[in-house]
Image (tube, helix red, strand yellow):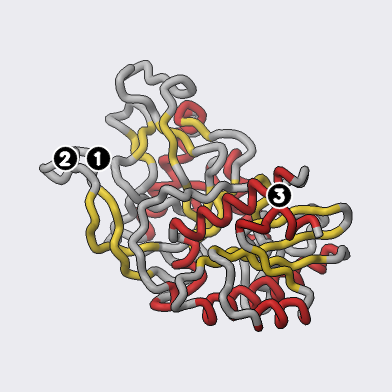
Amino acid sequence: MVRRPASVFDFVTDREMLPSSSCPTSPQRAFRASPMRQRATGEPYQDRVYWGAHGQASGRGPVSPYWRLGWRRPLDGPYGLSDPVTVAYLNTLRVEIIQALDSVLTAHPRSRTYPPFVDYAGQGLRAFQGYLTKVPRAFIEAVPALAEIATMASATRPSPAAPAPGAGRPMLGTTYRAANPHARTAQREPFSVDPDLVDRALQAHARTQEALRAAVEAAGKLPCSPAPGEPVFDVAWEDGETICVAEVKSLSGTNDERQLRLALGQVLRYAHLLRAKGRPVRCFIATEPRPADETWFELCSELGVTLIWPDVFAEGIQT
């Protein structure tokens, strides 16, 4: 089980970037440059997942994806690394890395360590063949190019006393991370687990977020996503000196009241934290579809929150 606030690393294979001299048809792996690292957040929950094994280890593979019971682990990010860390680079540190991984095995002789890389018959490091491996801190400390990960993880780690330790940084956010409106997700009631984490996994949420992003760009603004340690807003942008922050919510007709109450609390909290940058903050709640209860427009107006939906995105972010 991936426990919070553990960092989760992504791998990528690239035949052009990482040709393998020993096996031309099997490209090597590298830590992805961007996106690269995510952080476990919230709590894992059981759900239906659309998945199928790609390899032969199951004895049946490759298997076409199908809906099955599984678990979801919410992640924030992803956050990029300055430069990709290739297998070729790691092999220049082969001795140090093997020593670091061996030290973990020695310290935990009765545990399965699932290392991210193994020494393949003395021919060099290769990625461990598994869907999920463990990256020990000793490995990160043995690779200078990954040192920024340990530093950033420590500096931006949320805590009960400091839920957004990076909120006061002068710059707002980081490069916008697109939501996937075509992701295969099981439909479920958002409040059956963690309402915000489940809602963000739904296609309706992704479509609304991408529509808002397009409207922001059409208005000549630059949308962004949270940087490490900032509040986990959906979309933010700058309008002169003003920071604009938006929370996206999908409404089903049966969950509107709960979703809007959640959104209002979230966006007001995001604004409060982002004011640590010393700039004014404007709040938006973006829904799909338009809320049916007119009293929500009255409440949001009283609190200085702009309530918008796709048909009025362009007008709403300009006024």
Q: Nearer the viewer, residue 83 or 275?
A: 275
Q: Nearer the viewer, residue 289 or 265?
A: 289
Q: Amino acid at mark 2?
A: Gly
Image quarter where the N terminus lies is bottom left
Q: Amino acid at mark 3?
A: Val
User: Which image quarter: residue 2?
Assistant: bottom left
Q: Nearer the viewer, residue 245 or 91?
A: 245
Q: Nearer the viewer, mark 2 or mark 3?
A: 3
Spatial distance from mark 1 to mark 2, Cα to Cα?
6 Å
Q: Residues within 10 Å of mark 3 (few under 14, many from 20)?
A: many
Q: Amino acid at mark 1?
A: His
Find disc 1 in the rendering and name its residue: 54
Find disc 2 in the rendering and name its residue: 61
Secondary structure beneath disc 1?
Answer: loop
Instruction: Identify the residue shown where x is 32% and y is 29%.
Output: 122
Secondary structure beneath disc 3?
Answer: helix
Find disc 3 in the rendering and name its residue: 216
Name the residue at the left extreme: 59
> Of marks 2 and 3, which one's residue comes earlier in the chain?
2
